Amino acid sequence: MTGVDRAPMTRPDAIERATAAGPAIEARHAAVRIGGRTVWEHLDLRIDRGEFVAVLGPNGVGKSTLIRAVLGLLQLSAGELRVLGARPGVHNSRIGYLPQRQTFDAGLRVRGADVVRLGLDGDRWGLPLGGRGRRKHEQAQLVAEAINQVGAEALAERPIGEVSGGEQQRLLIAQALVRRPDLLLMDEPLDSLDLPNQASVAALVAGICASGVTVVMVAHDVNPILGYLDGVVYLGPGGAICGPPEQVMTSENLTRLFHTPIEVLRASDGRLVVVGQPEPPAFHADRHSH
């Protein structure tokens, strides 16, 4: 996928990340079958380092399945998939992962900084990483750096249950960034957020990508992130189409992908509206009416 002009990279290692040899993710003739059902097949995909790419399509076409395959949690039934130059799972320590949106009880008193720290030691069943002195200081620096990167300094000492949904999402993104990943995978991070918070989180993620982190985001609505994207992966029963949004999201392509007439319209404000049988990755009034 070809890139677009971005703001100057801010991290010292950003240029090294974005220009590292080989693509961040590459699939050739890939397929996944679950319980005897083919979820997707014939997937040819290349996501270059430093790109911001959205995975789109209606429910049930395998968007989250693709994320699980990239993480090595699902084996391909055919084809090949390479992640950061190796088979899936090998470099998971270099991947940040934000699963589908979590809901925190309003009474939860865990501090925002402790939620972020779980990205360092959450795989130890709540047991903190050992070490004192320099190592403890380095861990604190990583947490503070991630919180600063998402602009959540004011949330560090506040209980997670007392902050808004958009603020919680910022802290969870910081949790995914705390190990300084090369690749950030996000599964519908904008879901259930109101429109202002969608726009805020979308701009935040674009800034993270501009720092040299490759971002792959599963999205139900492409519009909040459309202006930031380098490429899209559109999944459907007819396979997958990959490339720049303006080339992929056309009436002709989606009609072929879904084997039914689909019309892609552009509203006066620039938003895309997909009209046809599949559930459209466009504006959902029922989700954002509040």
Image: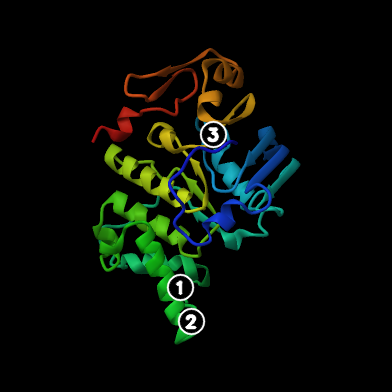
Neighbours of disc 3 within 10 Å: few (<14), some (14-19), many (20+)? many
Quarter holding the C terminus? top left
Circle on res. 126: 1
Q: Position of residue 57 (x, y in %)?
A: 52, 31
Q: What's the CA distance linking mark 3 and mark 2?
A: 40 Å
Q: Identity of the amino acid at label 1?
A: Gly
Q: Identity of the amino acid at label 3?
A: Val
Report whether residue 188 is seen: yes
Q: How is the image coloured?
A: rainbow
Q: Position of residue 76 (x, y in %)?
A: 71, 44
Q: Where 122 sits versus 165, above or below?
A: below
Report whether residue 35 is seen: no
- Label 3, on which residue? 232
Asked if the residues shown at circle 2 and circle 1 are in contact, with their CB atoms under 8 angstroms apart, the answer is no
* Viewer-side label of 2, 1: 2
Residue at image position (49%, 18%) is 277
Circle on res. 135: 2
Q: Where 60 sits versus 87, above or below?
A: above
Q: Is residue 150 left or right of residue 107?
A: right
Q: Where is residue 38, by image quadrant?
A: top right
Q: Is residue 144 left or right of residue 11?
A: left
Q: Where is residue 162, by image quadrant?
A: bottom left
Residue at image position (49%, 78%) is 129
Task: Name the foreground residue: 101 vs 269.
Answer: 269
Q: Identity of the amino acid at label 2?
A: Arg
Q: Secondary structure at mark 1?
A: loop
User: Which is more N-terminal, label 3 or label 1?
Assistant: 1
Q: Position of residue 40 (x, y in %)?
A: 65, 34
Asked if the residues shown at circle 3 and circle 2 are in contact, with their CB atoms under 8 angstroms apart, the answer is no
* Viewer-side label of 1, 3: 3
Residue at image position (35%, 68%) is 113
Q: Residue pushed farthest top? A: 261
